[in-house]
Image: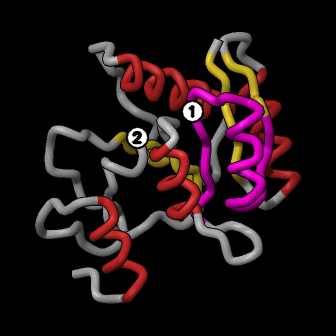
Amino acid sequence: MLKILIVEDERPLAETLRYLVEDNPRYRVVGIAEDLPSALELLEHGEPDLALVDLHLARGSTGFSVAVRLNDAGVPCLFVTGRPPGFAMPDLALGILLKPFTGNDVHRALALAEDVMRGRETLRPRLPRNLQLFEADEEPEPMPVAAALPERQGLKARLERWISGTAH
């Protein structure tokens, strides 16, 4: 059973996502966090295998900062957002699921994320239109908005440049 942490500040959406995830008996939600401090608290108690992370969170937190801390703790992330970043980040997240989504989209995204996490090579059927998986071994494809980074850099360097507004 895959244990999942949901990081989403809109409580009705977080509860809907919990319902959709737990509709499949292979997945269990270990908690819902609305910002970085609550995500870190749940990380200690829930021992998640994967986190579904919104990029735009409450109280000044961002999904980027949450993903950095979760990745440092060995928990891979799948971004779930209505506004994708302008570039792919294979060293920060497994991929991105765009809102709105259906229960089937969530289940397929979780199954594919689990395959990537477990290192399983699978024949991937056509992905849902709102799901993009990032490939760590390849140059990422551009996201639908803006251009991808021209060169691969370390995670911290890219985030620092993105935060300072100098990312090109």
* Label number found at residue 38: none
Q: Which kind of residue does numbered mark 2 sit on?
A: Leu
Visible residue check, residue 127:
yes
Quick one: which residue is furthest to the bottom in this view? 165
Picture quadrant where residue 126 is located: top left
Does 14 appear above or below 29? below
Residue, x 68% and y 40% (percent of image)? 43
On screen, residue 139 versus residue 126, left or right, reads left
Picture quadrant where residue 21 is located: top right
Residue marked by disc 2: 94
**Residue 106 rendering spot, x and y as whole percentages:** 61, 33
**Residue 159 rendering spot, x and y as whole percentages:** 37, 70
Q: Which secondary structure lies at badge 2?
A: loop
The range drawn in magenta is 31-55
On whether residue 53 falls in the magenta region, the answer is yes
Q: Which secondary structure lies at badge 1?
A: strand
Residue, x 69% and y 50% (percent of image)? 40
Task: Check the picture and name the quadrant holding the N terminus.
Answer: top right
Tag in front: 2 or 1: 1
Residue marked by disc 1: 50
Q: Earlier in the sequence, mark 2 or mark 1?
A: 1
Pick the residue in front: 159 or 125: 159
Residue, x 31% and y 75% (percent of image)? 146
Does 152 appear above or below 14? below
Task: Check the picture and name the quadrant holding the C terminus.
Answer: bottom left
Separation (CA) of disc 2 from disc 1: 10 Å
